[in-house]
Image (cartoon, rainbow, N blue to C red):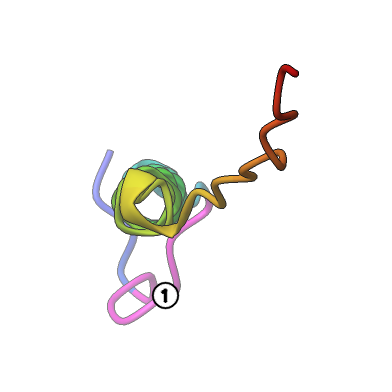
Amino acid sequence: MYKRHSFGQPEKTASTGLPIGVMLLSVTAIAVYLIVGGEILDDNSRDAAVYLPQIEAK
């Protein structure tokens, strides 16, 4: 039944789509950041080489 003075009342239930979407987008962005950062820092050209002195055989 139509209520005469119910116009403009706030919603009784809240939508959860936006907060969940923002949270999933944040988690995805952090995961991509960590994966890309890990690939950039995993550079094999920085490996150190150790050369032992050669022993002369007499």
Q: Seen in the image, is 29 located left or right of residue 9? A: left
Q: Residue at x 31, y 82 (%)?
A: 8
Mark 1 Cα shell of 10 Å, populated few (<14), some (14-19), many (≥20)? few
Q: Residue at x 44, y 58 (%)?
A: 46
Residue holding disc 1: 9
Residue 10: x, y in percent?
Answer: 45, 72
Q: Seen in the image, is 14 located left or right of residue 53? A: left
Please check the rendered image and state whether residue 9 is part of the magenta-colored stretch, yes or no: yes
Depth check: give the residue in front, 53 or 9: 53
Q: Which residues are magenta?
A: 5-12
- Dot 1 lies on which element? loop
**The C terminus sits in image quarter:** top right
Residue 33: x, y in percent?
Answer: 36, 58
Identity, as a three-letter code, of the amino acid under mark 1: Gln
Q: Residue at x 47, y 51 (%)?
A: 23
Can residue 22 be seen from the camera position used here? Answer: no
Q: Residue at x 30, y 69 (%)?
A: 4
